[in-house]
Amino acid sequence: MQHKVTKAVFPVAGLGTRFLPATKSIPKEILTLVDRPLIQYAIDEAREAGITEFIFVTSRGKSALEDYFDRAPELEASLKAKNKTELLDIYDKTCMDSGAIAYVRQNQALGLGHAVWCARHLIGDEPFAVLLPDDVIAAEKPCLAQMIDAYADTGGNMVAAMEVPEAATSSYGILDVTASINPKLKVNGMVEKPEKGTAPSNLAAIGRYILSPQILKNLDGQQTGAGGEIQLTDAIAKEIETSDNVYGYRFQGQRFDCGTKAGFLQATVSFGLARADLRDELEDYIYDMMAMRQAAE
Ligand code: G1P
């Protein structure tokens, strides 16, 4: 019988240098999309998919992230005294139950595979999810919940997948798949950041995974791959060879690459426009700006 997926790993050890100088003193994951830190989107998505144990792989300088998920007694007391129920609701969602969240350190930046491997003792012998908080996915049904449903049929290992432009394939893990209209895809091979012109398809792995504990054993070898890093993609690819149980899942939803400034700005505008309290003002502003640009041309 298959285990229910209740644990998720959030690799958050990166330095966030693309967002300097902001990331000099705050972790990238605390940067806000409208009014919620990036990490909150990933946590909410995991919760909605039934995750109850959250494992953060952190590094030095990430203490703001740990504080964010704690209770803040002064703030709480002040909101209660003023009877600010709506804000208390928002605040409550940021507080994790005692023991629900665990932090392990990655003390050297050796790659995504290594970061996930750092969580091995907390995961044990169960399937687990991995969410990369840089990939923010707007969807009616959250991406990980879509995958959990599909995984109930397939078991094995599942990777979120999305078509990307040919020219962008060298920035992703790329899947070699048999053509299919089904959102579930059998993966025949996976290659991390293929050199230009060598990608087996234009179907990219996006930062949501459901993995078998065997992946952690595959990572024990600490083999380096693309960019000299220990790659999660390689550990998954090994499973294709040995167990032939890797699936891609073409999710419904819009993915934003919040690891880049342009992607972060696009997500900010899109999430702002999706908010009833901000839509009108923001829309007017965008129209005015476009009109001004056109008039100037
Ligand atoms: C990581 C993974 C890559 C995946 C990408 C999705 O790359 O290694 O396989 O396609 O996330 O965002 P990174 O963006 O950390 O370079």
Image (spheres, rainbow, N blue to C red):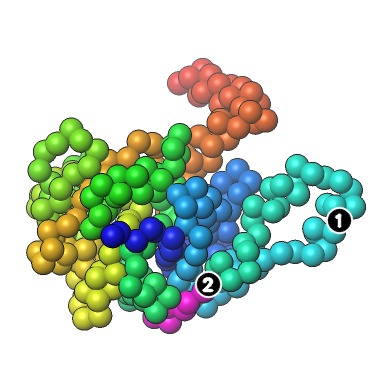
Which part of the image, by quadrant, shows the C terminus?
Answer: top left
Residue 117 inside the magenta-drawn segment: no
All told, the count of numbered labels is: 2
Is residue 138 toward the left or the right of residue 200 in the image? right
Check the image and name the residue furthest to the front.
1
**203 in relation to 182, above or below:** below
Q: Secondary structure at mark 2?
A: strand
- Expressed as whole percent of the image width and height from the top left, the position of residue 78 reads 86, 56
Amino acid carrying label 1: it is Ser
**Residue beneath the point at 63% across and 64% down:** 97
* Viewer-proximal residue among 148 and 228: 148
Q: Rate crowding at label 1 as few (under 14), some (14 to 19) or many (20 or more) other CA atoms within 10 Å.
A: few
In this view, the residue in front, 49 or 43, is 49
- The image shows residue 24 at horizontal and vertical percentages of 56, 68
The answer to whether residue 17 shows anywhere in this view is no
Mark 1, residue position: 78
- State the mark number for residue 8: none
Q: Which of the 4 quarters of the picture holds residue 25?
A: bottom right
Residue type pointed to by label 2: Ala
* Residue linked to disc 2: 102
The range drawn in magenta is 102-109
